[in-house]
Image (spheres, helix red, strand yellow):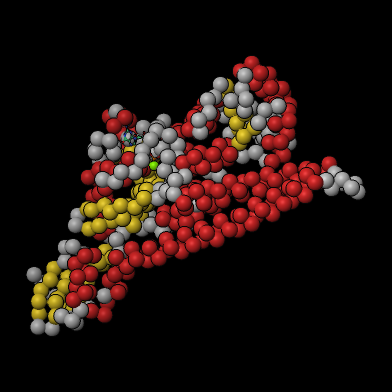
Amino acid sequence: MIAATPQGGVEQLDELRELLRTAGVATVGADVQHRDQPHPNTYLGPGKLAELKEELGRADANVVACDDELTPRQERNLEEALGVPVVDRTAVILDIFAAHAHTAEGKLQVELAQLQYNLARMRGLWTHLERLGGGVGTRGPGETQIETDRRLARDRIAALKRKLGHVRSNRMVMRAERERAHFPQVALAGYTNAGKSTLLNALTGAEVGVRDRLFHTLDPTTRVLRAGGRDYLLTDTVGFIRKLPHQLVEAFGATLEETRLADLILHVVDGSAEEEDRGEMIRAVDDVLAEIGAGEVPRMLVLAKIDRVDEEGRTELRNRHPGAILLSALTGEGLPELTEAIEQEFARRLRTVDLLIPFSEGARLAELHEIAGDLVREDTPEGVRVTARLPAPVAERFARFAAATPAPVA
Ligand SMILES: Nc1nc2c(ncn2[C@@H]2O[C@H](COP(=O)(O)OP(=O)(O)OP(=O)(O)O)[C@@H](O)[C@H]2O)c(=O)[nH]1
Ligand SMILES: [Mg+2]
């Protein structure tokens, strides 16, 4: 396996190497080409291409991986020139997703992304053949086959989108129920391998799988986080990466909705990463969040894995990211600060209400107890007088019970 990229140094390929390792492929060499733009037809320029071909033979490699998404034409021309299969970054990521998808929904989403990726490639192949043909009688069976394949792929894509649509509406129903309960929704988002699942486990006692490999988590998991007498719903979901294939963003729409509709996003960053990498990872996550429409959701930066960072490094982190929470899900350090910060964030959004609940509305009273654990109540002849701090939407729902006169100061 040889990896290639058009810009930067060979260390730029570390992530691709890691992706390949996760996909079960060993890397025997890496090469970088310095050009402003990848070659439109062959990705690599002619000189680099010849060099790479020689290197391939020497290293006895049987596949080449490129760190960008190739056009179908580039991929085909490269394969012809090099005589080995060529895969691009997108194909490697899709392959990992396919291997890590466990739930029915996850599998559907990955299949959709793969089909969309392949459909583009089929189209490329098709125009290529068309160009070769042209004359009367040259419309061979191969071309018909490709047309059939494309139609089948399109049909399947439509069917998958329908199925995912159902999953999505189910999810919306579940959401609506959760929303009625008004537990604030907190989503963990971040670069793949940042430590999101480990953090969910540490905070809620969940047992989500954790591993030192990329895209270990694909399916969302939601658990209750109890803090300061209130319940929060904390969701862990798929991680992001630089140049995240757009097919995946589209296919994972239902999953990513958990993040888009959250009340607060905890942006988890590997605090032990090199400063330059860290900056790039933060930017990549910001970009994806904007792309999925979650750009406006309030966000809190969490620098994880600080058990690996010394005092000097921590000071740098604090200076570089003021307001961020430094923590280690492994040692538990910083976790109380995080729950405290979450509480404060939501406390700011609570509204104090003064209500008079008639005795006939016992169910409403029970609901209030559940939502606002720390309410003050007093029985009066007209009903139960309640002073509580409520999320704004709940406060609106209870507006009709507003007490006519202000509560006596206790
Ligand atoms: N030293 C240290 N390692 C950690 C900490 N948190 C997570 N890790 C390790 O980092 C690796 C990735 O952790 P995960 O929790 O799986 O990361 P993730 O963000 O869920 O990753 P994906 O699901 O693949 O996107 C694992 O090997 C964890 O053991 C931490 O606080 N300290
Ligand atoms: Mg995970």
**Residue 390 image point, x, y percent:** 25, 66
Which residue occupies 65% across, 52% down? 153
Which residue occupies 45% across, 37% down? 214
Point out the image quarter for the N terminus.
top right
Which residue occupies 56% across, 58% down? 161
> Count of labels shown?
0
Q: Is residue 313 left or right of residue 78?
A: left
**Residue 28 image point, x, y percent:** 56, 21
Residue at the right extreme, as displayed: 136
Q: In the image, is residue 84 above or below residue 291? A: above
Q: In this view, does 153 lie to the left or right of 404?
A: right
Q: In the image, is residue 44 above or below residue 246? A: above
**Nearer to me, 147 or 68:** 147
Q: In which quarter of the image is ligand 2?
A: top left
Q: Is residue 94 left or right of residue 298?
A: right
**Residue 234 image point, x, y percent:** 32, 52
Which residue occupies 39% across, 38% down? 194
